[in-house]
Amino acid sequence: MANSGTTTMISALWPAAGRIPLRLVTLALVGTALLTLSAKVQVPFWPVPMTMQTFAVIVIGMAYGWRLGGATVALYLLEGAIGLPVFAGTPEKGIGIAYMAGPTGGYLVGFVVAAMTAGWLAERGWDRNFLSALAVNAIGTALIFVFGLGWLAGLIGFEKAVTFGLVPFLLASVLKIGLGAAVMPLAWRRVKAWRG
């Protein structure tokens, strides 16, 4: 994909000039707040309630680029590791390292990889049209599942990992992939119209 001008959505909205550390810290904190919110809000869905966490991870990666996107998700994991209740099911299901070492640990690691991959592809213009953005969202989601299932299989076996860690989430994942593919190109059209 050809890169058309500005490399990321956030650099089009808030160009890096002057107070770069303030900009980066602000964006990272806003990103971790959005990730926390996306983990806490459950949308009624079948067969299991849906959070918007994977959607937020990939869109943040696409909007921020691979470095800031990866750093933002890593900061989110650090917040969880020190005991802040930022993850889905926290504090009810535990907090900190103990929570992260549980069944969802691999998915959390996958978040960083997915955000960085999505950001790297977006920096190359893959977030500008529906089909390439669809590919970015599908790749990011697949990476989250690869890491998540790999970790979960080590705890409960591969067959159970697929049964409990993949199958119930497939329909919601397809919906979020489509939504992510629609959001970024639409946002770029808005930005281009706004900038004239």
Image (cartoon, rainbow, N blue to C red):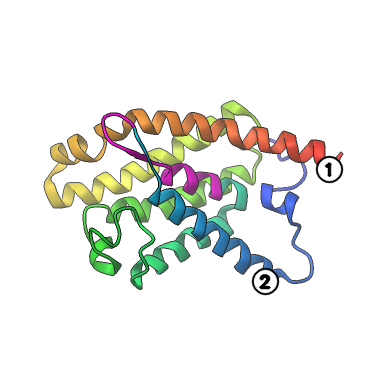
Q: Residue at x 24, y 40 (%)?
A: 165
Q: Provide the residue designation for mark 1.
A: 195
Residue located at (37% from left, 45% from top): 144
The residue type indicated by label 2 comes to Leu
Q: Quadrant of residue 173?
A: top left
Q: Position of residue 41 (x, y in %)?
A: 40, 46
The residue carrying pointer 2 sits among few (fewer than 14), some (14 to 19) or many (20 or more) residues within 10 Å by Cα, namely few
Residue nearest the viewer, comparing 16 with 41? 41
* Horizontal and vertical percent position of residue 147: 31, 48
Is 71 in the magenta? no
Tell which of 125 and 100 is nearer to you: 100
On the image, the x and y values in percent for residue 126 come to 61, 37
For the residues labelled 2 and 1, say whether their Cβ atoms are less than 8 Å apart.
no
Residue 183, compared with residue 131, is above or below; it is below
Question: Dot 1: what SS?
Answer: helix
Rendered residue at 64%/42% (across/down): 124
Magenta segment boundaries in residue numbering: 45-60
Residue 93's label in the rendered image is none
Whether 194 is drawn above or below 91: the answer is: above
Determine the secondary structure under disc 2.
helix
Which of the two residues, 86 or 192, is positioned nearer the viewer here?
86
Q: Please give left or right for residue 99 compared with residue 17 in the image.
A: left
Give the spatial CA distance, label 2 vs label 1. 24 Å
